[in-house]
Image (cartoon, coloured by chain):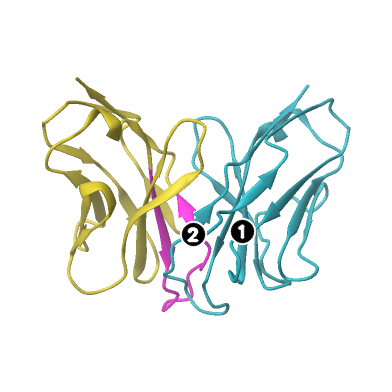
Chain colours: A cyan, B yellow
Amino acid sequence: EAGVAQSPRYKIIEKRQSVAFWCNPISGHATLYWYQQILGQGPKLLIQFQNNGVVDDSQLPKDRFSAERLKGVDSTLKIQPAKLEDSAVYLCASSSSRAGVSSYNEQFFGPGTRLTVL
Amino acid sequence: AQSVAQPEDQVNVAEGNPLTVKCTYSVSGNPYLFWYVQYPNRGLQFLLKYITGDNLVKGSYGFEAEFNKSQTSFHLKKPSALVSDSALYFCAVRDRGASGGSYIPTFGRGTSLIVHP
């Protein structure tokens, strides 16, 4: 079984530039998560999708971050414009959870994209 | 709001000795609890979880964890550590939502486990 794929693996940009990350979850996994992991901290959930709908985006800085999962499979996370404090590893994860109820299924994580904002 | 605390930034243990990585949590309802491991340059991997039932949960690579409701803890343990266990360990919690808590997963800041030969 193929794992969660993410690209690019590394990205360096100047502040105020835009950047996009791509994620392909495990086949058949309806739930997809984007996390931000700042150095020395645990992953922080940015947004959770169930198929192509948003389940939770309460921690997504919507003035600069956006995410979509148009066909309920692949997802993209965009930052526009980037700030220095956005430097982090962006993790994508998927699970076979059902929406609307507390999920007890484990998540499968991709390798992450390390973003450096200069 | 739910939270997770991993009080130790780093745990050092000699190979062959037992290890414990501590985790305490706070939720408004009843928790789902998870442990993940992160090896260098790799994504997080699921180790084990507590949903309900037996308080002692067994997981991958010989790890186990004990759910203690009165102490709101979910410490990770292994009877005999291996050098290859050296990695970053994350505890995570999700509220089951019975008391209107958040469903979103919350992770601790991680504990670096170093096993010395």
Task: State which chain disc 1 sits on.
Answer: A
Which kind of residue does numbered mark 2 sit on? Gln
Q: Which mark is residue B85?
A: none
Hey, which quadrant is residue B38 in on the image? top left
| Residue at image coords 11%, 31% | B16
| Residue at image coords 16%, 27% | B15
Q: Position of residue A106 (x, y in %)?
A: 44, 62
Magenta stretch: residue B96 in it? yes
Q: Are marks 1 and 2 in contact (CB under 8 Å)?
A: yes
Q: Nearer the viewer, residue A59 or B75?
A: B75
Q: Which residue is mark 1?
A: A33
Does residue B53 appear left or right of residue B32 in this picture? left
Q: Check the image and report above or below for A102 versus A76.
A: below
For mark 1, does the 10 Å Cα neighbourhood hold few (<14), some (14 to 19), or many (20 or more) residues? many
SS type, badge 2: loop
Residue A82 seen anywhere in this rendered image of the structure:
yes
Residue B112 seen anywhere in this rendered image of the structure:
no
Return the residue found at the far front.
A1
| Residue at image coords 46%, 30% | B40
Which kind of residue does numbered mark 1 sit on? Tyr
Task: Point out the tag, 1 or 2, that comes first from the N-terminus.
Answer: 1
SS type, badge 1: strand
User: Which residue range is magenta in the image?
Assistant: B90-107
Does residue B61 appear left or right of residue B6 in this picture? left
3D distance between C-alphas at marks 1 and 2: 9 Å
Q: Which mark is residue A107?
A: 2
Q: Nearer the viewer, residue B61 or B95?
A: B61
